[in-house]
Amino acid sequence: MGLFTVPEARAELARLRPILDELVVVRADLVELSAALTPGGEPTALGGLPERKAAEARLNELMTEVQQTGAELKGLAPLLIDFPADLDGVPVLLCWLEGDTELGWYHRADLGFAGRRPLPRDALHPGG
């Protein structure tokens, strides 16, 4: 997979939104089902072991769908997705964290999440 431009990454993120929304729901269901299956766990209306196995399988399918775009799924709780890119000749990862309204952050590929910075204005609004 190649590198994303900022507009391409934004378009891909928009396309992924329904998948990401479902990931959040399935993730929560899986946690609830797993807790119910532990000794002394609170029962849940979501079901039991078959439903947990189904939720696990669906979670894996959704994660695979995200990865197949060329984006990198770096975290599940909270969701953290990186889009490999190039910013002024520097390898970076455009970074979306669950709860972000848009793709507005990046970090150098070698720095990781702690090096996260807001995208410069000219990257957000090219030519303006």
Image (spheres, grey):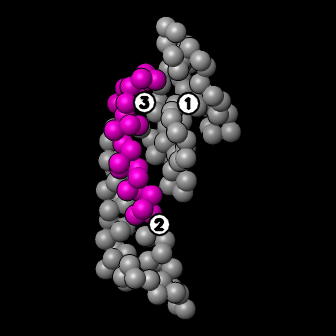
Q: Name the residue: 55% across, 41% down.
A: 100
Residue that label 1 marks: 104
Q: Name the residue: 50% across, 55% down.
A: 76
Marking on residue 60: none
What is the x, y in percent for residue 29? 43, 70
Residue that label 3 marks: 10
Q: Name the residue: 41% across, 50% down.
A: 20
Instruction: Give the residue at the far bottom of this rendering.
Output: 40
Disc 2 residue type (three-letter): Ala
Residue that label 2 marks: 28
Q: Which residues are magenta?
A: 1-27
Q: Badge 2, how many Cα within 10 Å: few under 14, some, many 20+?
A: some
Disc 3 residue type (three-letter): Arg
Is 88 within the magenta? no
Circles 2 and 3: CB distance less than 8 Å?
no
Classify 22 as above or below 82. below
Disc 1 residue type (three-letter): Gly
Q: Earlier in the sequence, mark 3 or mark 1?
A: 3
